[in-house]
Image (cartoon, rainbow, N blue to C red):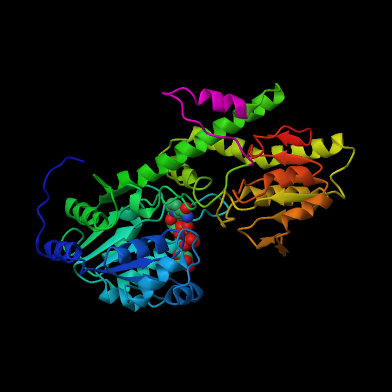
Amino acid sequence: MADTEVILDTAAKDLADRIRSRRARVGVVGLGYVGLPLAVEMAKAGFHVTGIDVSEAKTERVNAGDSYVGDISSKTLAPLVESGKLRATTDFAAVRELDTINICVPTPLRKTKDPDMSFIVSACEEIAKNIHSGMLVILESTTYPGTTDEVVLPTLTHNGLEVGRDFFLCFSPERVDPGNPKFQTANIPKVVGGCTPACTELGRLFYSQALETVVPVSSTRVAEMVKLLENTFRMINIGLANEIALMCDRIHINVWEVIDAAATKPFGFMPFYPGPGLGGHCIPIDPFYLSWKTKQAGIEARFIELAGYINGQMPHFVVDKVRDALNDASKPVRGSRIQIFGVAYKRDIDDVRESPALDVMLLLKRMGATVTYSDPHVPVLHLDGVNLVAEPQEAVQTADCAVIITDHASFDYPALLQRACLIVDTRNALKRFQSDKIVRL
Ligand SMILES: NC(=O)c1ccc[n+]([C@@H]2O[C@H](COP(=O)([O-])OP(=O)(O)OC[C@H]3O[C@@H](n4cnc5c(N)ncnc54)[C@H](O)[C@@H]3O)[C@@H](O)[C@H]2O)c1
């Protein structure tokens, strides 16, 4: 965005003063993986923060200083709650007392792969009942370009408030990477784009109180598209890595060795790795927000569809590997006990949303296998109407096959190699080991 000075009028100036002096009352709607870390960061920066969530269980835990988000320890949360800097409520009447609101509610896809805007709409309707002049509202939920202008803005302006003059509205994509020890809310650069230059300026000012780097862009649509580009880039490159893995498998080449060697090129190459399929709340879902939107404009998102197809094949490929490995050991899948290592969608986290482990487990179960799992981060797993309880890692001793789906750092890989009779490794977690027991992706 051009580096021009934005002239703020009265309401904006007042809000800017409150933000600079940390007197602004900050609100965060949706206290999940994204909202709670943001609320904590703002409270650490000296603001009084109110979290609003529809889940009473979550607000009670926040108010007890008891964190349920992996990246936030209760040790960090509790003192903020005790000092009165952070509190949580289910009551949207709290909005009346707030100066800023960040909306961090879920944006899933419907079964038809259409965006489900219902959480954003319902949060905005509640905010609209209590909105007042001089507020800054920032949508952070990942969504299709146009959502802030077309869905949020009309909901908030129904009572005659004018955006850019009476209240201020921005979109700022959330880039949090749960479980990443190096990059967390405070040091991940934050992109923000507002409905007007005054909105963008207030958004920039707000984040810069607590976050190291803020990147203003010219509009909400640009900010919305930034997030979709980032996640589409990742999804398509993983799709390419998966397709290369399928090719390498067919012509008997170790794909992991190929990628590691290619990654020694100091320019023009960035390694992506194959795996059992995409997981999580973002990478498998967000690109379909873009394809849904562009379809309306008459453009097919062909890369997205193709990568979605290839990535969707990976759980089947893993199951084929397991079946072939068992067959080579003269054991049919039906009746075998197969122990899955790692059901979270990525290493060292507890989130199982969209995890490919669930697909692999269901496919194996339908083929007649008895499927168990070990995951130090997921003590209980709801699968196919049943609650499974995590097995100790040693239970692999009596399994016919182990399948590493998620390479948690805390797995004891040497012990696994010793105890298991057969291991299908979808993450190259056993890279350091050579054994006939190992079947690599
Ligand atoms: N988790 C990630 O790694 C990640 C990363 C980047 C972006 N995002 C995006 O951020 C958004 C939030 O994701 P998340 O992972 O934090 O989700 P989450 O499910 O962990 O948290 C969302 C919270 O919103 C609450 N909620 C739902 N409806 C509400 C309403 N109407 N009013 C108030 N609270 C409500 C839920 O109870 C829940 O606590 C999504 O759009 C997601 O795509 C997530």
Tell me: residue 143, above or below residue 166.
above
* Rendered residue at 41%/66% (across/down): 76
* Rendered residue at 62%/39% (across/down): 275
Residue 387 falls inside the magenta stretch: no
* Rendered residue at 54%/51% (across/down): 280
The mark tally for this picture is: 0
Quadrant where the C terminus sits is top right
Relative placement, left or right, of 401 versus 346 is right
Quadrant where the N terminus sits is top left
* Rendered residue at 77%/48% (across/down): 364
Q: Position of residue 233 (x, y in %)?
A: 45, 36
Of 101 and 440, the residue lying toward us: 440
Q: Is residue 369 visible?
A: no
Tell me: residue 170, above or below residue 60.
above
Q: Position of residue 422 (x, y in %)?
A: 79, 41
Residue 297 picture quarter? top left
Of 292 and 119, the residue lying toward us: 119
Q: Quadrant of ligand 1?
A: bottom left
State the extent of the magenta-drawn residues as a range: 256-276
Q: Is residue 246 visible?
A: yes
SS assignment for the magenta stretch, majority: loop
Residue 260 falls inside the magenta stretch: yes
